[in-house]
């Protein structure tokens, strides 16, 4: 299993010790596979199979985050993988469904079936090279974004029907942004179970701002 080795030679098992603190979810990022993947962040299917099975064998919940890119993506970096960036929206819609199902089926066969699956990372401003904004903007491609996102969520539901689907965004303290953005998803019938949020005090305000934003989302 995984362990951390200290300078004095002593070590401790990561999963066991983390679970003993009361944590029960382990979150793993999945980057794309292939020659274009950034080696500094590469977590390909074989890696995720191995670590995912360790998580499951330890009795923890396996949370899988698909980045759908060759490198790290977030609110400021929405690039698609090199192999997908020139695809049309229709091609990306088909590709995300195919890729998601292939990965999840392989993980299930390897004994590493995720308990929760996050479709994209901090996608409030888009993903897979498709740009949107949480407000009215002529630069947003909501039709394309929603088409691709819907296909990704549907693929999760088909391959892992018991898994919870996470939609992950940032700026939780901005109620106007959240209402506009999640209103788009709800109007289109995007299938998801959990809203995952990134909160950075430097950009997103105080804890009281966060609380008001969370109360807004709950309502």
Image: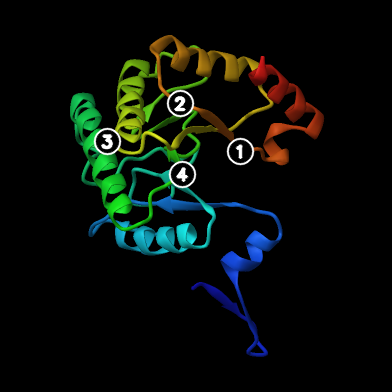
User: Is there CB contact under 8 Å for labels 2 and 1?
Assistant: no
Q: CA distance from mark 4 to mark 3?
A: 19 Å
In the rendering, which numbered label is found on residue 172? none
Question: Which residue in the structure is indicated by mark 2?
Answer: 192
Please say if the residues under marks 4 and 1 sit with CB atoms less than 8 Å apart: no
Give the residue drawn at x 69%, y 33%: 204
Q: Quadrant of the C terminus?
A: top right
- Residue that numbered label 3 is attached to: 96
In this picture, residue 207 sits left or right of residue 61: right
Label 2: how many Cα within 10 Å (few below 14, some 14–19, many 20+): many
Rounded to the nearest whole Å, what is the CA distance between mark 2 and mark 3? Answer: 16 Å
| Disc 4 crowd, CA 10 A, few/some/many (<14, 14-19, 20+) | some
Q: Label 1, on which residue?
A: 198
Callout 4: SS? loop
* Left or right: 50, with 90 as reference point: right
| Residue 115, disc | 4
Q: Is residue 2 above or below residue 183?
A: below
Upstream in the sequence, badge 2 or badge 4? 4
- Earlier sequence position, callout 3 versus callout 1: 3
């Amino acid at each position: 299993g995984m362990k951390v080795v200290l300078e004095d030679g002593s070590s401790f098992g990561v999963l066991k010790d983390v679970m003993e603190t009361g944590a029960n979810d382990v979150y793993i990022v999945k980057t794309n596979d292939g020659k274009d993947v950034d080696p500094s962040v590469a977590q390909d299917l074989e890696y995720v199979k191995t670590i995912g099975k360790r998580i499951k064998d330890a009795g923890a919940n396996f949370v899988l985050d698909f980045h759908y890119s060759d490198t790290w993506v977030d609110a400021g970096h929405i690039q698609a993988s090199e192999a997908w960036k020139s695809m049309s929206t229709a091609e990306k819609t088909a590709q995300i469904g195919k890729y998601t199902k292939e990965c999840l089926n392989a993980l299930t066969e390897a004994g590493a079936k995720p308990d929760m699956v996050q479709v994209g990372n901090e996608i409030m401003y888009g993903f897979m090279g498709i740009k949107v904004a949480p407000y009215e903007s002529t630069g947003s491609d909501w039709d394309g974004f929603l088409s691709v996102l819907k296909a990704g969520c549907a693929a999760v539901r088909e391959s892992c029907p018991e898994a919870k689907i996470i939609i992950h965004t940032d700026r939780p303290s901005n109620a106007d942004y959240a209402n506009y953005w999640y209103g788009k998803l709800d109007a289109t019938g995007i299938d998801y179970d959990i809203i995952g949020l990134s909160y950075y005090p430097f950009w997103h305000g105080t804890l009281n701002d966060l609380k008001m934003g969370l109360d807004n989302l709950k309502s």
